[in-house]
Image (cartoon, rainbow, N blue to C red):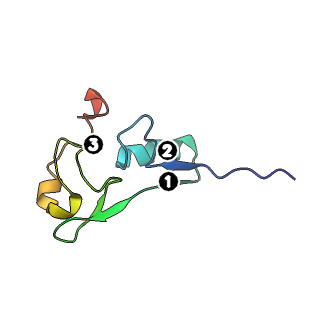
Amino acid sequence: MRVRPIVIGHRGFSARYPENTLLSFRKAVELGVDGVELDVRLSKDGMAVLMHDATVDRTTNGIGAVADLTWEQLRTLDAGSWKAEEFA
């Protein structure tokens, strides 16, 4: 008996789209994945934020730890143009 492997989109379809974004999750689902893996961190003021790293440095235009930034600061960051200009 052959068992079909479970396919999980790591941070969505992060090979093509900015990771941990709604676009990345939607595109992974369109491809037919069984699920998506995401990372949740808390902002300084206790808001849940999708971010793989402890800092925003790698995937946004900001600098600093998610836990040291408020939701208002985090929501202004650009989380797409690092991947490609089309996601700015």
Give the tally of numbered discs: 3
Residue at point 44%, 46% (across, down)? 26
Residue at point 47%, 55% (across, down)? 37
Q: Where is mark 3, residue-wise?
A: 58
Indicate the quadrant where residue 43 lies: bottom left
Neighbour tally class for label 2: few under 14, some 14-19, many 20 plus, Cα within 10 Å: many
Coordinates of residue 68 in the picture (x, y in percent): 16, 62
Neighbour tally class for label 1: few under 14, some 14-19, many 20 plus, Cα within 10 Å: some
Q: Compared to 11, does 42 lie above or below?
A: below
Q: Where is mark 1, residue-wise?
A: 36
Q: Compared to 77, does 16 lie above or below?
A: above
Give the mark nearer the N terminus: 1 vs 2. Answer: 2
How much space separates mark 1 and mark 2, taking CA atoms?
7 Å
Q: Nearer the viewer, mark 3 or mark 1?
A: 3
Give the mark nearer the N terminus: 3 vs 1. Answer: 1
Of 63 and 32, nearer the camera is 63
- Give the SS element for disc 2: helix
Coordinates of residue 75 in the picture (x, y in percent): 17, 53
Residue at point 37%, 45% (across, down)? 19
Q: Nearer the viewer, mark 3 or mark 2?
A: 3
Q: Is residue 42 left or right of residue 21?
A: left
- Give the farthest residue toward the top: 85
How much space separates mark 3 and mark 1, taking CA atoms?
21 Å
Residue 28: which disc?
Answer: 2
Quarter of the picture containing the C terminus is top left
Give the mark nearer the N terminus: 3 vs 2. Answer: 2
- Give the SS element for disc 1: strand
Tag 1: amino acid: Val
Residue 51: which disc?
Answer: none
